[in-house]
Image (cartoon, rainbow, N blue to C red):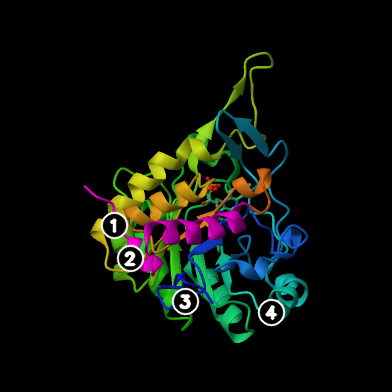
Amino acid sequence: MNAVNLQVNLGGLVMKNPVTVASGTFGYGAEYDQYFDVSRLGAVTVKSLTLKPRAGNKPPRIFETPAGMLNAIGLQNVGLDAYLADKLPFLREKNCTIIANIYGYGPDEYAELARRLEAEGGADAIEANLSCPNVHDARHARGGTLVSQSPEKVLEYTRAIKSATKLPVFIKLSPNVADIAAPALAAQEGGADAVSLINTLLGMDIDPETRRPRLGNIVGGLSGPAIRPVAVKMVWDACRALDIPVLGMGGIASTGDALQFLLAGARAVAVGCMSFRQPDAALKIIEGLEEYCIRQGITDINDLVGAVRI
Ligand SMILES: Cc1cc2nc3c(=O)[nH]c(=O)nc-3n(C[C@H](O)[C@H](O)[C@H](O)COP(=O)(O)O)c2cc1C
């Protein structure tokens, strides 16, 4: 029997512990099952799903940077039909809690993805990626915008998704904004059950010898420990503005990192690219959270949420 209650409720999604994995860093779950029993996770968050399969961007698509990595995968994924037919059965057989991350071209596609995922039992919650920096190829180098950079669009998209499903809906936001509270509040106004943050920070790296960008897409998204303090601060900012809960992520590599996000106000956390370096990182963090609670005499992990001492 657990001496510590690790269960959390993230906007209507009951998770047996507050740790999931970040979309795009954990495949569809089965890829990691050789390293640990993935049903131990509070939830498995799958790679962004689109209506049709996507091949992604031209290589190179990943470049290691100091304390992090740049990626411009471009939402390579199997598409909704293949997810439902080939990937979902494993997750259901293992009794995993599933957060299905979705990406669409316009609010109608997001709504369609959410509707079909609910109808076909493909998710326990929807996370709408309104913040992928890598899907319009080089356009961002020329000043394109992400949906989540416009509070008006966040409101419109959130309403469309919410009207299509009764599943909990999480809106995933970009850190590439001046004030994270603005899109977060727009998501809340649109009926979101939680917000997820942060997605990657836009970045660029150039090889001085060839004078070429390191990524085929020219620019990409920065993730890893380098972005953690930015992410903690944005979670803190968002939590002070919102009534709905926050799923915090960005550079989490250890139990201590995960605790920082909870203390800043996140109800749950996601481990991202650390799983590339240490495939069972999320499991170690779950175990570490329980040990921390026992050591600190805390019987309910929810008591840590927002408990930073200022
Ligand atoms: C290789 C890679 C692929 C990613 N793909 C997605 C994706 O498909 N959808 C999405 O919402 N976020 C995607 N992300 C962003 C992560 O989910 C996460 O928000 C971000 O990496 C910050 O967490 P981290 O620093 O712990 O990796 C991706 C990140 C990486 C590194």
Name the amino acid, label 3: Leu
Nearer the observer: mark 2 or 3; the answer is: 2
Nearer the observer: mark 3 or 1; the answer is: 1
Q: In the rendered view, tell whether residue 182 sits above or below residue 84.
A: above
Classify mark 1 as within 8 Å of ligand 1 or not, answering yes or no.
no
Q: Which residue position holds label 4?
A: 92
Residue nearest the observer in this picture, 263 or 88: 263
Magenta-span inclusion, residue 295: yes
Q: Which of marks 3 and 1 is nearer the N terminus?
A: 3
Q: Residue at x 44, y 42 (%)?
A: 228
How far apart are labels 2 and 4 at the CA level?
31 Å
Element carrying mark 2? helix
Q: Which residue is drawn at 50% across and 65% down?
A: 128
Nearer the observer: mark 4 or 1; the answer is: 1
Q: Where is residue 193 in the image (x, y as percent from the top left)?
A: 38, 72
Element carrying mark 1? loop
Q: Which residue position holds label 3?
A: 13
In this orientation, does residue 172 appear?
no
Q: Check whether the beta carbons of the residues at disc 1 and disc 2 lie within 8 A of each other.
A: yes
Q: In the rendered view, tell whether residue 102 sits above or below residue 181.
A: below
Q: Position of residue 224 (x, y in %)?
A: 54, 41
**Classed neighbour count for the residue bearing mark 4: other residues with Cα under 10 Å, few (<14), some (14–19), many (≥20):** some
Q: In this view, does 92 lie to the left or right of 155?
A: right
**Classed neighbour count for the residue bearing mark 3: other residues with Cα under 10 Å, few (<14), some (14–19), many (≥20):** many
The outermost residue toward the bottom is 119
How far apart are labels 4 and 1 at the CA level?
35 Å
Name the amino acid, label 1: Ala
Element carrying mark 4? helix
Q: Which residue position holds label 2?
A: 303
**Classed neighbour count for the residue bearing mark 1: other residues with Cα under 10 Å, few (<14), some (14–19), many (≥20):** few
How far apart are labels 1 and 2 at the CA level?
7 Å
The outermost residue toward the left is 310
